[in-house]
Amino acid sequence: MALHREREEDVEAQLNKGALWAITYGDLMSYLMIFFLILFQLSLLGGNIAEGLAELQSQFGGKKESKALERMESRNQEASMAKDMKTRLHDRGLEKFATVELTQHRIEITLSEPILFTSGDAVLKEEASPLLQEFAKSVSNLPNLIVIEGHTDNVPIRAGKYPSNWDLSMARATSVVRYLITSGGIDPRRISGAGFAEFRPKMPNDTSEGRAANRRIEMYLMRRE
């Protein structure tokens, strides 16, 4: 009887081990099913991660909107804007006068002086209009803040309308801001301007190439946090 009882206990122990294994296996299958469900949902939405996760959250009883998902959607829109701006510049053959860079905190569009202004002046050239229009179109559907910065080289102004590089850089930034508001349709509450003269150079001012690179306008679309 004792031997029979021991055998029954051994069988029960083996069954218990098998039951534990089955539970673990079942959990794994559940996780895999959820994973593939997420992939399927994203495929239906064209790969939009933020929208897909929001939809899944809604289907499982959660709130569809959340700050994290909204931020992800904003980031996707901003990245699309940067790509759109590059395409617009390329299609117009303007890429040699402007660069677009996507960073963690902003989208940076750098415009060289020759396409915007004549030397020592802050009146926009006619050639500047297509470039600034493309920027305005790219950002028109976004609520992000826009910052315009004017920069110069370190060569002092000896004559003309502007007494210093400070005045010139500020005037140039103001000209771009005014154009984007009046001709580009940008909401004035979204945009601001500043001038930094020669004090934020991109390159050393000891060569003509460096000074040319430093005479620029930088337009920032600030990314939403």
Image (cartoon, rainbow, N blue to C red):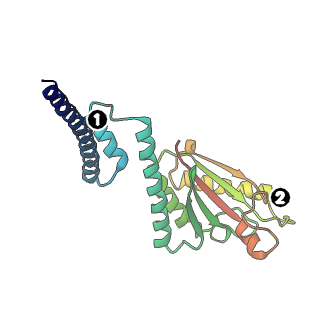
Q: Are marks 2 and 1 in contact (CB under 8 Å)?
A: no
**Residue 203: image x %, image y %?**
74, 67
**Identity, as a three-letter code, of the amino acid under mark 1:** Ser
User: What label sits on residue 58 in the rendered view?
Assistant: 1
**Identity, as a three-letter code, of the amino acid under mark 2:** Ser
User: What label sits on residue 219 in the rendered view?
Assistant: none
Helix, strand or loop status at disc 1: helix
**Residue 135: image x %, image y %?**
52, 59
Residue tagged 2: 164
Closer to us: 131 or 30 = 30
**Residue 169: image x %, image y %?**
74, 57
Rendered view: 57 above or below 108: above
Closer to us: 155 or 103 = 103
Q: Earlier in the sequence, mark 2 or mark 1?
A: 1
Residue appearing at x 78%, y 65% in the figure: 153
Among all residues in the image, which is located at the extreme right?
158
- Mark 2 or 1: the one toward you: 1
Closer to us: 153 or 115 = 153
Q: Quadrant of residue 12?
A: top left
Describe residue 161's horizontal placement relative to residue 14 as left or right.
Answer: right
**Residue 202: image x %, image y %?**
72, 64
Residue appearing at x 70%, y 57% in the figure: 150
Closer to us: 130 or 153 = 153
